[in-house]
Image (spheres, rainbow, N blue to C red):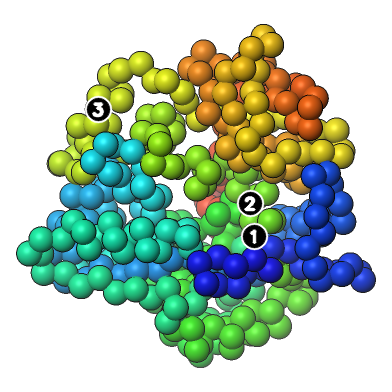
Amino acid sequence: FEEVYGHERPRWFARDGVAQEDHYSFRRNVVHDMVGREVKAVRAGVGLMDITAFTKVEVTGPDAASFLDGLTPNRLPKKVGGIALTHLLNERGRIEIEITIVRLANDRFYLVCAAFFEQRLLDHLNQRRNDEQIDVINRSTSWAALAVQGPRSRDVLAANTDAALDNGSFRWLNGKEITVAGKTLWAFRMSYAGELGWELHGPAGDMLAVYDALWASGEQFGVVDYGSFAMNAMRMEKGFKGAGELTNEVTLPEADVMRFVKMDKGAFLGKAETQASLDGDLPWICAYLSIEADGEEDGHGGEAVLLDGKVVGTTSSVAYGHTVGAIMAFAYVKPEAAKPGTELEVVIMGRERPARVLAEPAYDPESLLPRADAPGLDAIAAG
């Protein structure tokens, strides 16, 4: 387990007689195989993860939409149930937090971010309040959350709800209040693993019953529990940036996340600074790398990145991609080293490894899997 802002969260699940304890090493050890098993099970079938540790905050009231719109570079979801990924910036245009915003009602928004940013998010909201008619409600402890992910996730969830889950009824990046195992909760169709899947958020007292029901329904599909190590490996295969990349040292252009920014919207905190970053020469850019694996040492972040033998940057996140068979990494490098296709070297455990800058995710680059329809309906749509 790991402690994340007061929450206990599994890193990985011990099986086959492996001791339930931390196994320390700079090289691969038995944990590598446990994580690989979890990743394979999620990619091929279905997995459940307790994601309760994520920060969960509601902003409600008549001025909730205008208040949040002035803080976010992306547009807020227009429709109830809409989901948007965006960022909160400081006055220097640097990234404070990446957040997911769900519109639960016209005047009610649900914000989710990394667990250790809970106080930062609350401070960011409260310190920028004036006379707006809003309430900021911290649900990080009173609500729990589960992720059900994988190609069989629809089957597992459908066995426990009367809600229609096909694409026509429940679209990708959409949320609905539904009943699961007799408990009313919010289901968000989204995936940090890059698979068909849902996140289920609701009162903490209800979530154990929901978990038990999902597990029972998933046994025929080989359901597994998976932890934060597998989650990290899968997000790296999908090229999803995390807290190691999105820091208050970098701007949105430097982090290469401008696809989540709408510069043609109204004013937002840090807009002028973002424009200045766009117009100027970037000192570094976050690049997505595939690194040759040697089967023994995969790195841990902070490795030097070389171009033609000269240091041009450093890795921010590193994880072995069990599905793609390569080490995946993000690295902040000089602009000339960030172009897709550029051949680099990454120094891992004192040895230079061949690496290449990727232009798209290593796994499911077109992101077709999260949008998969119910069995039979894909063929109908194609025909």
Residue at x 62%, y 63% (from the top left corner):
149
> Whole-percent x and y of residue 259?
38, 36
Determine whether 336 is above or below 332 in the image: above
Mark 1 burial class by Cα count in 10 Å: few <14, some 14-19, many 20+: some
Gap between marks 3 and 2, in whole Å?
31 Å
Secondary element at image label 1: helix
Q: Which residue is mark 2?
A: 232
Residue at x 22%, y 36% (from the top left corner):
271
Determine whether 377 is above or below 58 in the image: above
Q: Are marks 1 and 3 in contact (CB under 8 Å)?
A: no
Q: Are marks 3 and 2 in contact (CB under 8 Å)?
A: no
Secondary element at image label 2: helix
Mark 2 burial class by Cα count in 10 Å: few <14, some 14-19, many 20+: many
Secondary element at image label 3: helix
Q: Are marks 1 and 2 in contact (CB under 8 Å)?
A: yes
Gap between marks 1 and 3, in whole Å?
35 Å
Q: Which residue is mark 3?
A: 275
Name the image quarter holding the N terminus.
bottom right
Q: Which mark is residue 228?
A: 1
> Whole-percent x and y of residue 208?
59, 85
Gap between marks 1 and 2, in whole Å?
6 Å
| Quadrant assignment, res 50 | bottom right
Q: Which mark is residue 163?
A: none
Q: Earlier in the sequence, mark 3 or mark 2?
A: 2
- Residue situated furthest top in the rendering: 308
Viewed as shown, does residue 307 lie left or right of 71? right
